[in-house]
Image: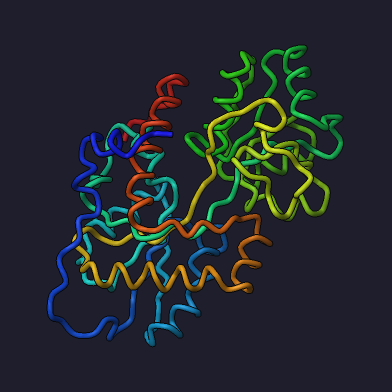
Amino acid sequence: MVQRRELLAVSGLAALGLARPALAQAPWPDKPIRLIVGFPAGGPTDFAARLLQEPLQQLWGQPIVIENRPGASQMIAAEAVAKSAPDGYTLFLCTSNLTTNPAVFTRLPYDTYKDFLPIIVIYSSPTVLFTGRNRPFRTVQDVVEFVRKNPGTAAATSGIATSGHFATEMFMRSNNLDITHVPYRGAPPALQDVVAGQVPITFSTLSGAIGLARDGALRPIAIAAPKRAKVFPDVPTMAEAGFPIRDTSPWYSFVAPAGLNQAIADRIERDVKMLLAREDIIKRIEDSGGQVEGEGQAAFRERIPREIAAMTEVAKAANIRIDQ
C-alpha cells in the first residue's frame, strides 16, 4: 500500500482539488445544476448519473440537468468541466478515465491535478474474465492451459486503453502468456463475438455484461477486483484463483471544477454518502453489477496519483500510447 507521505510527494498532488474558503454567498443551490457525462445515454456512466438524479433533486430542491458529451475517452466532457465556473452549478459524473487517460494519451486538454476537485467515488464495477457458454473453460487455470497450448489466443476488449485492455495486458505479462489483444469499438460487439465463439475470452466490465451473464450466454470465470461480486458470489477473484492482477475496476464519481467553495463540496459529499446508505440505491447498484464505494474527498484525492502511477507502469510495459 502506498503510504500517505509518498503520495504527498507526487508532483502536483498539493494542487489537486484546491477549494476556495467558505465565503458569504447565496444559499446553494438556488438554480438548476448541470451534470456533465462523458459517455452516451444508456451506458453504465449514464446509469450512474440517473441513479442519483431524482434523489438529489429532492434533497437540493433544484433540477439536475444531465448533459451527455461523449467522445475522446471522456476528454470532451472533462475539458468542458475544467473550463466551467467553480460555482457549484456544473458537476462532472467522472469515470476512472480520469486516471487512465494520463497514462496513455500524449496530451490532454486539461490538467488532471489542477483543474478538478474530486468529491466522492459513488461506486465501481469490477472487470471480469468471461468466456462464452460453449467454451469448456471453468477456471482461470483452464484458460491459462488453453493459451499455453494455443499461442496467440485472441482476447476481446471494448477498446484500446480500457479497463479490459489493462487487465488483459497484466494477465498476459504476469503469467508469461502469448495473447493477442483484439480491441473493438465498444463492449457490445466484443461481447457478442465472445458469445458467438468467435473469440475465446474477454476481460469486460461486469456492469456492461450483466445481462448476457445472467442469461448464461457469458460465463464469468474470475473477478479482477479485490472482492467477489454480489451478483455472482460463487465466482472467485483472480487472486483467489491463484492469478492475481492489479484492480482495474472502472469507477464512477462526482467531480467539480477546481476552486469550488469547500462548504458546497462538503455538502455534496455528505448528501451522496447519505443516499449511498439507502437500501433501494444499494440494490440498484449491486443489481447492475456494481459495488458501493462512498470514498470521500481525502481518499479520492489520494486515489488519483496512485492509479495514474499504476496505469502508467502497465501502459509503458505494454507500449500503450495514443497520440492526441
Query: Where's residue 181, x and y in %?
Result: 59, 26
Q: How many numbered discs?
A: 0
Which of these two is toward me, 141 or 209?
141
Is the N terminus in the top left, top right, bottom left or bottom right quadrant?
top left
User: Is residue 111 rendered to the left or right of residue 246?
Assistant: left
Query: Where's residue 262, x and y in %?
Result: 23, 67
Query: Where's residue 322, x and y in %?
Result: 38, 31
Q: Is residue 221 above or below residue 215?
A: above
* Colour pattern of the rendering: rainbow
- Judged from this view, the residue extending furthest toward the left is 24
Q: Is residue 263 above or below residue 213?
A: below
Q: Is residue 157 above or below residue 29?
A: above
Quadrant of the rendered image containing residue 25: bottom left
Is the C terminus in the top left, top right, bottom left or bottom right quadrant?
top left
Which of these two is toward me, 74 or 130?
130
User: Is residue 275 rendered to the left or right of residue 142?
Assistant: left
- Tell me if residue 69 can be seen: no
User: Is residue 254 rendered to the left or right of residue 251?
Assistant: left
Quadrant of the rendered image containing residue 211: bottom right
Which of these two is toward me, 206 or 305?
305
Residue at the spot 43% in from the left edge and 21% down from the top edge: 319
Residue at the spot 60% in from the left edge and 21% down from the top edge: 172
- Tell me if residue 312 can be seen: yes
Residue at the spot 25% in from the left edge and 39% down from the top edge: 8
Residue at the spot 82% in from the left edge and 53% down from the top edge: 215
Query: Where's residue 240, x and y in %?
Result: 70, 33
